[in-house]
Each structure stands twice: as structure tokens, then as C-alpha cells.
Image (spheres, rainbow, N blue to C red):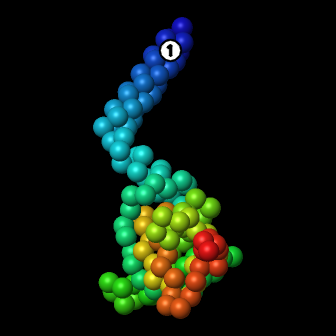
Amino acid sequence: MTKKIMFLGLAIMLVASIGYVFAQDTSNQSNQPSQQQSTDQNMPGMSHDSSGTPVMGTVDKIDKDKKTVTIKDDATGQKKTLSFNDTTTWMNGTSARTIDDLKKGAKVTFTVDQYNMISKGEITPAAGAAPSSAPPQPH
């Protein structure tokens, strides 16, 4: 009989402590929703919004298989390798473009997250080069 009461008491204490821990965890999550959302949205492979850090430079190398672009950063003069994915948007002014329009020597402004993932790429073609999918010009 004493063992049953002791077992029941331990079980009640265990359930109470789990409830306390869960309540503390829930309390912490409600105090920091923006930090959690921000981290989730910026994970590699996740959907990206247009917020982020602008990086301007000149394209040095494009590796479509690895989904990376290496640029010479205008601000630092250093080479930076940045990643892109299927949700990355490519633009030239107001015209939608694709990764195929990005060429070595092109001036670019990328919006990147904390993982160096490009969410938006603004392409300015290299001097004398036209984008490969330029819309036809009116006659």
C-alpha cells in the first residue's frame, strides 16, 4: 500500500513538472514570435521575402549545378560566393528574367539573407551584352 501511494505521488510530481516546463516554453515562444518567424523564413531552401541585405558587384562565375554565383563585391573588392534557389527572383528593371540571363561581367544588386541566399537578383547586363531572353523590340 505504501509503495502504491509513493508511486502515485511520483507520478503526480512528474506530470506537474512536465506541465510547468511546457508552460515556460509556451511563454518564451509568445515573447519572441518575430525572431522565430525571421529564422524560419531565412533558412536555406525556404521561401524568401524581399527584405535582406543588398550586395552590389560584378559577376565573376555562375555555377548552375551548385546554384551559386560568385561576384566581386563593389564595397569590399572581395569575391563572394552566394547561393540561389528556385524561389530566387531575377529582374532587369521591371522585366522578369531567369538565371540564364545572368552573365559573367554583369553588374548586379542581390538581396541576400544571413545565409548568403539570394532572394532577389537585379541584373544589369555587361557592357555590349544583351540579355539572352530580351523581349522583341517593336518595329
The quadrant of the image that shows the N terminus is top right
Task: Spot the residue most to the right.
Answer: 65
Camera-nearest residue between 132 and 34: 132
Q: Residue at (56%, 64%) from the top-left corner?
A: 96
Give neighbour class at mark 1: few <14, some 14-19, many 20+ (Cα, 10 Å). Answer: few
Residue 7 in view in this figure: yes
Task: Spot the residue most to the top.
Answer: 1
Q: Which of the 4 image quarters holds residue 72?
A: bottom left
Q: Residue at (35%, 34%) from the top-left corner?
A: 30
Question: SS for tag 1?
Answer: helix
In x, y percent, where is residue 22?
A: 42, 30
In x, y percent, where is residue 99?
A: 61, 73
User: What residue sits right under mark 1 in the picture?
Assistant: 8
Camera-nearest residue between 107 and 36: 107
Task: Spot the residue most to the front.
Answer: 139
The quadrant of the image that shows the C terminus is bottom right
Camera-nearest residue between 11 and 135: 135
Q: Residue at (36%, 67%) from the top-left corner?
A: 53
Q: From this view, report whether residue 65 is shown above or below residue 12.
A: below
In x, y percent, where is residue 131?
A: 59, 79
Question: What is the three-letter code of the residue carrying label 1?
Answer: Leu
In x, y percent, where is residue 80?
A: 46, 82
Q: Is residue 5 left or right of residue 85?
A: left
Q: Which of the 4 image quarters holds residue 26?
A: top left
Q: Residue at (69%, 76%) from the top-left corner?
A: 65
Q: Which of the 4 image quarters holds residue 4?
A: top right
Q: Is residue 63 left or right of residue 17?
A: right
Camera-nearest residue between 6 and 69: 69
